[in-house]
Image (spheres, grey):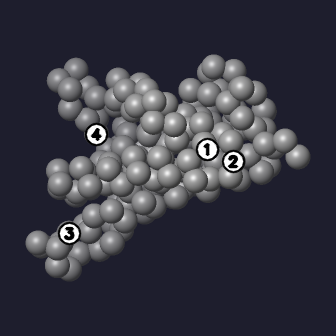
Amino acid sequence: MVLLSREMLTDNQWLALRDAPQFVILAVAASGGSRLDLLLERTAGARAVANGKNHDHPLLHAIAVPDEIDVAMAAVKGRTVDARGSLRAPAELLQLAADAVRQAAAALRTTGGELDLYAYRQFTMDVARAVAEAAREDDFLGLGGYRVSDAERTVIAAVSQAFES
């Protein structure tokens, strides 16, 4: 069985697959919490994407190349900030993330196999969980709170659902 690699994709398919995890990071991180939480969660998401270098799937290796991560972050930033340079509203980011995941899943369904879709889905969901678990929500100086907020659970569920549609 041949696993999908960057070379087997069109440019548009590659962009969809490369950028979707970045949209997911922003949607989960922006769903709630403080500015510090946002920073911690975005950092955790970047680490989770970079950890793709340890995956057996060649497509995930390609997504985790530092230069590709930088380009993806810049491309996604251009679509996720408003005219003032502020991050868009959480509902808008959720919609952008769900659309990006749908587009990536469609690319995998047309070009790749079931194993490719499974590996990419697991990778993307691992990124979403890493972001959600990076900072406690509704805590006071690190005490109390929740590991994953209801808003983050909602975003993760929407991302998971986007893989199915």
Identify the mark nearer the N-term, 1 or 3: 1
- Give amino acid for label 4: Ala
Are the two marked residues, 2 and 1, in contact with CB atoms closer than 8 angstroms?
yes
User: In terms of depth relative to the viewer, which is nearer, 20 or 164?
Assistant: 20
Dot 2 corresponds to which residue? Answer: 57
Dot 4 corresponds to which residue? Answer: 89
- Give amino acid for label 1: Leu
Give the x, y percent position of residue 47: 41, 51
Dot 1 corresponds to which residue? Answer: 60
- Element marked by disc 2: loop
Identify the mark nearer the N-term, 4 or 1: 1
Report, in whole angstroms, how far the alpha carbon at label 2 lies from the one at label 4.
Answer: 34 Å
Crowding at dot 4, Cα within 10 Å, few <14 / some 14-19 / many 20+, comes out as some
Report, in whole angstroms, how far the alpha carbon at label 1 lies from the one at label 3.
Answer: 34 Å
The residue drawn where x is 26% and y is 55% is 40
Dot 3 corresponds to which residue? Answer: 138
Of badges 1 and 3, the one in the foreground is: 1
- Give amino acid for label 2: His
The residue drawn where x is 33% and y is 72% is 147
